[in-house]
Amino acid sequence: MTTWLILGASSAMARALARAVAERGDAVLLAGRDMGDLDALASDCAFRGAPRAEAVAFDARDPSGFDAILKRTTETDGILNVAVFVGSMPAQDAIDADAALIDGTITDSFTGPARLLTLLAPLIEERKGTVVGVGSVAGDRGRIGNYVYGAAKAGFHTYLSGLRNRLTRAGAHVVTVKPGFVDTAMTWGIEGMFLVAAPEAVARDILKAVEKRRDVIYTPFFWRYIMLVIRHIPERIFKKMSI
Amino acid sequence: MSDKSMTYRGWGRVLEATSDVARPERAKALAADMAEAPAPALGGLRSYGDACLNDGGRAVLMTRMDRLVDLDEESGVLRVEGGARIGDLARLLAPRGWLPPVMPGTGFATVGGAIAMDVHGKNHHNAGSFGQFVESIRLITPKGEKTTRPDTLKELFSATIGGLGQTGIVAEASIRLKRAKGDVMMVTERRVADWDEHLALLDGSDATYTVGWIDATATGASLGRGILEEAETGAGLVPPAKRGRRVPFDAPAFALSSPVVRLFNAAYWRRVPARGRTVVKPIEDFFFPLDKLHDWNRLYGKSGFHQFQCVVPLAAADTLREMLERIARCGMASPLAVLKRMGPGRGGLMSFPMEGYTLAVDLHAAHRPAKLVAELEAQVAEAGGRIYLAKDSLAAPEAVHAMYPERRKWAGIVAKHDPEGAMVTDLVRRLDLRRRG
Ligand SMILES: Cc1cc2nc3c(=O)[nH]c(=O)nc-3n(C[C@H](O)[C@H](O)[C@H](O)COP(=O)(O)OP(=O)(O)OC[C@H]3O[C@@H](n4cnc5c(N)ncnc54)[C@H](O)[C@@H]3O)c2cc1C
Ligand SMILES: NC(=O)c1ccc[n+]([C@@H]2O[C@H](COP(=O)([O-])OP(=O)(O)OC[C@H]3O[C@@H](n4cnc5c(N)ncnc54)[C@H](OP(=O)(O)O)[C@@H]3O)[C@@H](O)[C@H]2O)c1
């Protein structure tokens, strides 16, 4: 059997992943802050075929709860996969007006999940699992529109790359996922979105990457090429652009 | 909560609206959206006309509220969020021996839309309408959350079933399911030569699911010719349904021009051998035959199409025959029309069903069918029947008010729960359905 611990399980992308693995017969532990929503999703996953589906309280900004999560996770069986969808993206101008927002942004997307993953790492090694870390194309380059969020994601990417280096030695694995624009609560109503992907399509890409033991994926795939171009624009030109 | 400015259309693509659309992903967000500024729900946007439009206003898109909350295997009662699609329910329930009690012809309709239109299916003659299987509704009204059942807040319940979304948003509903023998359908198809045979076969059918497909372009002695389908659930092996295809662009005007339509219909009719046949089909192929071709409504090109659907009492069968003759002669009709016998079952004050025969025909908007439809409507009214508001985009208020005798009572109940008119849609405005007098 396989168990998935899903952090940030109220996200539409996480929900799509949880449902897909439930339909295959995997167990799910759904971690997040909105317990009412997680309970509803747990019932939905059980209905779809998960042998075990439970909600777990998780706040990235409150590490005092992490031991309890570790304990709950230890009680599950089989292969242990951990998928991280946690993140928050306050508007850059809100951050410019209130620099204190930076700490929370970095904690949600990077240090909170990293801290919990570090606690979980020995268990993942033992249970030969895969970590799915959702970063963002925004972490590939600092842009005027969202560079604090981008910095948090870049930090998370680097952490994931190091964790991969570690877990590989134990036969476990890490997939870094860099979505482009996805049609979720985070982007609904934001202007200028294009080529927006369905959360279900992202979940499919993630599962394929886990199966094939890919290291870093872009989803949808074409973002790899878009970001290749963007990463290669010389800084002296890039600094004058607003994309 | 941020809204998104969206331009969207009903399924017929004739009418369009631009609204600020909220799309809650979870119960808390829905409650917050409704507390901020109550607005009508959008489901799968499978209503043809303006039932799902609120031009210039706000709307709450429910498609992300689609969790299956609980299935009681003993009683067969399913608790589900209002945005869940009927087709998803069928896919997930059938292998466990259950089906939604009533299914419209598209699996993309949502539970909330099925309640708001009190939809009917191919089993209406023996099962009744969707609303008759609803055990309870968690409704977010503009004045707050209420739980209503057939015996609790009775009035509100009868105004919510078939109530065009005017009493509030269905956040969650409990629905009594039907037993299914398995996840396939055993379908008997036979050719029907003409109108009289069609009615006789519909009258005599004791199958659980029965529907007549009519060639609405056949005239003279062939008038009313078509195929009768009768089906039961069954168990067995069929190849999994193929992934859907999508119509990628608006078809050119000739795609559904009348000679093409006539040819298509003749071929469809001959597909079934003269002596009939029984086939095993995946559930979705029988119930949702058009869903595999995603966005098939674009086949009608830019101008879109209208669907005319009415029901007339059994005794008025001859009027319906005259109407079909008129439609067949005009050359505006589309490939497939549907003829069904309905039972008396209906769940709410504004429900469409009544005992009788129902006919549904697609009409290409480019042919400007407004005058034809007006004439048909007059005939329906005369015969004591009514038109289906889920399909309409052309009717006038007075005619519709006369067809729905409990409308005034309904409007009174709705006014109590939505005194400010926050839930009004384009359809309700056009037909002045909430008028108190
Ligand atoms: C191919 C096809 C075949 C069809 N066959 C049939 C058939 O056999 N029988 C039949 O009866 N109908 C049939 N229909 C019509 C369809 O079932 C109805 O229009 C149904 O209401 C569509 O559901 P929806 O979720 O798309 O609702 P929408 O069209 O989006 O909305 C319809 C109404 O429901 C309200 N509503 C939607 N969600 C909620 C909610 N959560 N809470 C409160 N109100 C809500 C809206 O405000 C609106 O008034 C068919 C339609 C198509 C396209
Ligand atoms: N949408 C896009 O276009 C896009 C593109 C690239 C990357 N991403 C990334 O994809 C992931 C999923 O995002 P989404 O688009 O689905 O948006 P979302 O719905 O806002 O999901 C973010 C999730 O993170 C959770 N979260 C935030 N702060 C938390 C905290 N302190 N503790 C616990 N949980 C916390 C939220 O939980 P609550 O439910 O409690 O709020 C929410 O479930 C995020 O990491 C996002 O950065 C999104």
Image (cartoon, coloured by chain):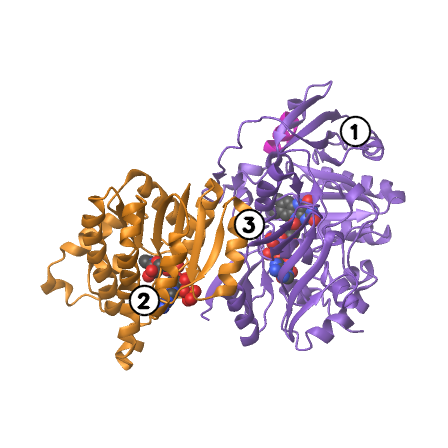
Instruction: Give percent across and percent down for residue A62.
Output: 35, 70
Amino acid type, residue under disc 2 in the picture: Asp
**Chain letter of the purple region:** B
Which of A17/B366 is in front? Answer: A17
Instruction: Give percent across and percent down for residue B344.
Output: 84, 48
Q: Is mark 3 within 8 Å of ligand 1?
A: no
Marks 1 and 3 belong to one chain: yes
Amino acid type, residue under disc 1 in the picture: Asp
* SS type, badge 1: loop
Q: How many marks?
A: 3
Residue drawn 72% across the image and 34% down it: B214
Q: Is B277 located above or below residue A220 in the figure?
A: above
Q: Residue furthest right?
A: B315
Circle number at residue B303: 3
Left or right relative to A233: residue B82: right
Amino acid type, residue under disc 3 in the picture: Ser
- Please state the chain letter of the residue tagged with numbered disc 1 in the rendered image: B
Circle number at residue A108: 2
Find residue A204 and report its image quarter. top left
Residue drawn 68% across the image and 65% down it: B428
Split into quadrants, the picture shows ligand 2 in the one at bottom left
Circle number at residue B194: 1
**Chain letter of the orange region:** A
Q: Which residues are magenta?
A: B258-267
* SS type, badge 3: loop
